[in-house]
Amino acid sequence: MSKLHVFDMDGTLLKGSACLELSRHLGQLEVILELEEKWSRGELSHFEYWELSLPLWEGLDDEIIDRTFAATAWLSGIEAVWADIARRGEHSAVITQSPQFFADRLLPWGVETVRGAEVYVGVPPEPHQVITPEDKVPITVELMAGYGVISTDCVAYGDSLSDYPLFQFLPNTVAVNATPALRQIAAAAYEGDDLWEAYLVGRALLDRDGKALKR
């Protein structure tokens, strides 16, 4: 049976977040930091965050997105991880609350599936376009069904409370440079700048489950 590796993006694959980096390049960093602070305190819903954030990005185009993506501080080893997963006949996915138009730029690096917020600059967002932490579970279940895998064949990699529901759902989870709250419920943890090392931790969890099933 195959395996499924599910990666968060912000704080896990990159240091910081896509929204912060895009806002930095557009000179709106202070405003977006204030919105993110309110969001983290629960003063803004996920939908309200996008309603207020998208107008700040007026003038955003593919060239700016490409420059921002290239300048972002990514963990090392991402492409090597996704190449190894594909070589084994396994599956990889990124599920992020950040915009799909940013996360899609990970596809050339070898990830199989990307799911992000379907929001667009200059277009008022709709509630169904937003991805919440809770949405990560049904998206993962949908992928599991499509690939014919069960929960013990999956491993999730994340860093914060946005990954909490998925970490509660899956038995194999790796907290990557994570908050104390997420580390507390994770099956394993990794601190560092190399995704390959975090991936090895995830593989060890899958191997553990495989050995348990054979007994």
Image (tube, rainbow, N blue to C red):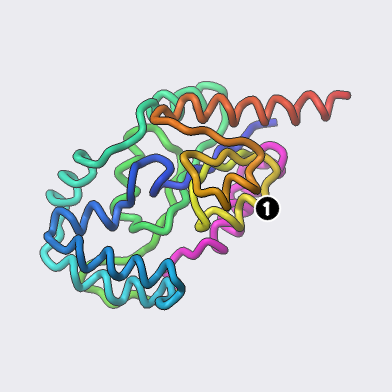
For label 1, the crowd category at 10 Å Cα-Cα, with few meaning under 14, some 14 to 19 and many 20 or more, is some
> The C terminus appears in which quarter of the rendering?
top right
Residue 161 or 214: which is nearer the viewer? Answer: 161
Which corner quadrant of the image does residue 110 belong to? top left
Which corner quadrant of the image does residue 126 belong to? bottom left
Name the side, left or right, on which 209 lies relative to 44: right
> The N terminus appears in which quarter of the rendering?
top right
Name the side, left or right, on which 126 lies relative to 85: left
Q: Position of residue 5 (x, y in %)?
A: 56, 38
Mark 1 lies on a secondary structure that is: helix
Callout 1, which amino acid? Phe
Q: Is residue 23 above or below residue 106?
A: below
Q: Which residues are magenta?
A: 128-153
Q: Is residue 142 magenta?
A: yes
Residue 167 or 110: which is nearer the viewer? Answer: 167
Q: Position of residue 160 (x, y in %)?
A: 49, 52
Q: Is residue 118 above or below residue 157?
A: below
The residue under the point 65% across, 48% down is 185
Name the side, left or right, on which 62 lies relative to 205: left
So how many labels did they put on this image? 1
The residue under the point 51% across, 37% down is 92
Magenta region, mostly helix, strand or loop?
Answer: helix
Which corner quadrant of the image does residue 106 belong to? top left
Residue lying at the far right of the rendered structure? 215
The residue under the point 64% across, 25% down is 204
The residue under the point 34% across, 33% down is 109
Residue lying at the far front of the rendered structure? 180
Q: Is residue 192 above or below residue 132?
A: above
Q: Position of residue 98 (x, y in %)?
A: 36, 57
Kindly identify which residue carries mark 1: 169
